[in-house]
Image (spheres, rainbow, N blue to C red):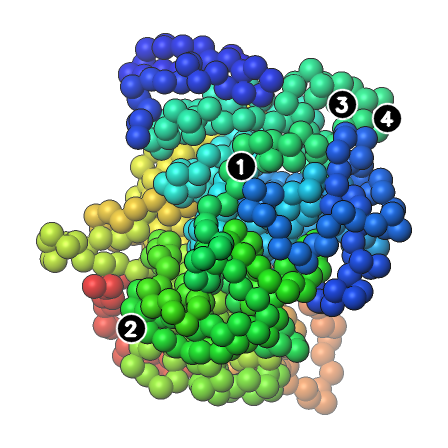
Amino acid sequence: MQSIIRVAGHRLARPTRTAGHRLLSTVAFGSAKNAHGYYLPSSQRASVLMRASMARVHTTADLRAEPAVSPSEGASADLGDMIPTERIRNVGIIAHVDHGKTTLVDCLLKQSGALSGATMQESRVMDSNTLEKERGITILSKVTSLMYKDHRINIVDTPGHADFGGEVERILSMVDSVVLVVDASEGPMAQTKFVLTKALARGLHPLVVLNKIDRPASRPDEVDSELLELFLALGATDEQTSYDMLYASAKEGWCSRDLSVVASYVDAAAQGQKANGNMVPLLDAILDRVPPPRGQREGAPFSMLVTQLEANPYLGKCALGRVTSGIVSVGDSIRVLAPETGDVIEAGKVTKLFLRSGVQQIEMAQAGAGDLVAISGVPKVGVNSTIASPDVTTPLEFIPIDPPTISVTFSVNDSPLAGREGTMLTSNMIRDRLLREAETNVALQIVSDGKSESMEVRGRGELQLSVLIETMRREGFELSVTPPRVLFKRDPENPKLALEPYEEITVDVDHDVSGNVIEKLTKRKGELKSFVDVADKARIVFHIPTRGLLGYASEFKNDTHGTGVMNHAFLHYGEYAGAFEKTRKSSMICMAQGTATSYALNMVEARGRLFVRNGDDVYSGMVVGELSKDGTDLDVNPTKAKQLTNVRAAGKDETIRLTPVKPWSLEAVIAYINPDEAIEVTPSQIRLRKQILDPTRRKQNSRKRISDISHFID
């Protein structure tokens, strides 16, 4: 490596690597602080699931894209058996979005033999949720396991988007180390900093994998330097900065500690040959560098912290977590303790114990400290609850997560078109569904706003809320959703001072549009922190109020012609930055109910951009377009039809050609909406409307100025 460490602008050292290891003496500076699934009974397990390759892989030749040992040869151990803690490794996979962590997990599972049949041909098998497959992102954290050299490696795959950071924070209590996956071209990004901060604060020692190393734009030396600087900036100890580094191409299925070996793999691929590599170096590194789980089994009472809830169609609610102490068996009596208070929520018995391997659930007879298992038999259990033996009275500590930063209000759809498509229409149905979501998603907060027909939902970002709305509309709900609003809070030292959330935004854009991006972010109260060249792009880092990012995504896409990449993560609460300039033009409001006609739309289109097509149902108060000039909202009638008479005209009608209308996506409409508007969501339609449909009441209400800091969290 040829990176240079600088403190106060002075060159201190030129750290080096030997076989992927950082020399400890080169980093001990003063700047570092020293301090789909189904379960199988055991009778069927050996013939269907147990493969020798899952239980024992001894050499490099044994680990290929297909398992090297046939199932008929048998396995040395039953996956459902409880094994000693010395042969267990619990590791989490953390990374920035789209850096390849889910692909890496897929590769490990396929090469170890944990997947078989049709799943061997699937990509991103861990992304089992429909929305995850459609969007290409991980939304929920998932636990799986594989066997390697008689060791069970439990792997937790986590989301990479900042909006789902609560999933990352929650799983850190389940693992003893993490694999930090970093794109060898992009380097550490905003979410890389977030997840690494949480891991270092827990005292974990990360393994670093530079993924996509086979790309022409990869820059391993520079990325290694940036990573070390990030570790030091986050206060990592000397032991944490002496991380192992491996170079990998998860898509091609290999990794190595040596860049010369990587070069040979890349050359082979360039000549059309298959690289003779695999994931053995990473698995060996996990066995060597990840410590076995701590926790007493014999003589200690059973206790487990619940980190995730799963729904089983036959068993009901199952609680997933890590066994902290003791041993639990099927049929044992257990109790559920409330977090913090320790109150007994429920008492019951263990009906089933499950271990997940690949995408399947393996039934277990008993589990002990260090195992990651799912327990059924206590339907009232919740996330962060403690499941323990009857003699345990103190709940286990859980990791607090960062607070939500934005909120929206869910209410009943009261438009004239309500009830035509959905089956879940009442406020009670909406409330019950939101409360069920809050049970499993601890990053969401559901707050009653004092109105019987609406509920306030607080979350981390627009993407998280849009995923929830999309999930509900597919379940048959009809909703009315208000625009996202930033959550302010009062300064504890000065209650009169308002604090608002700030985020760190990182954008990679072409140099010719960087000036426009900087100008737009500066107008949104952003503060420029760095401007560096990364390959052929300009990387710009801003600290900006969360309010400044609301609605900016679509504008950023237009400014960069779709070539820019933007990522952001929560930074801190800071002083209120003041009011923003108006960034959106006025709207065209429908003044009549009926069906839009091409005759009327042709005349309305001259005023601006249309949101509705010929034949769409419209109603009074619905937003049907955007004016091309700024000013007040304009009432239009898109339902007007051409009057037919028996008088012949000398000429003929002109052919009407309307500009095609792009259907709304949830992310786009959430980013576009004005404060006095609302989103009407049905199973097949997304419409934009005014919150007050009556034009007279709307004009009266417009005279009242509404402050953007009228709502606080105390």
Q: Position of residue 341 (x, y in %)?
A: 29, 69
Look at mark 4 in the image and give the residue it sits on. Answer: 273
Which residue occupies 28% across, 77% down? 701
Which residue occupies 53% across, 37% down? 290
Give the CA separation, mark 3 to mark 1: 27 Å
Quarter of the rendering containing residue 617 = bottom right
Can residue 441 be seen? no
Q: Earlier in the sequence, mark 1 or mark 2?
A: 1
Identity of the amino acid at label 4?
Gln
Position of residue 189 relative to residue 607, above or below, is above
Q: Earlier in the sequence, mark 3 or mark 1?
A: 3
Out of 240 and 86, give the one closest to the viewer.
86
Query: How many residues crowd around disc 4 within 10 Å: few (fewer than 14), some, or many (20 or more)?
Result: few
Question: Which labelled disc corresponds to residue 702?
Answer: 2
Kindly report which numbered mark, 2 or 4, lies closer to the viewer in this rendering.
4
Kindly report which numbered mark, 4 or 1, lies closer to the viewer in this rendering.
1
Give the CA separation, mark 4 to mark 1: 34 Å
Q: Are marks 4 and 1 in contact (CB under 8 Å)?
A: no
Q: Earlier in the sequence, mark 2 or mark 4?
A: 4
Question: Which labelled disc corresponds to residue 290?
Answer: 1
Q: Earlier in the sequence, mark 3 or mark 2?
A: 3
Identity of the amino acid at label 1?
Val
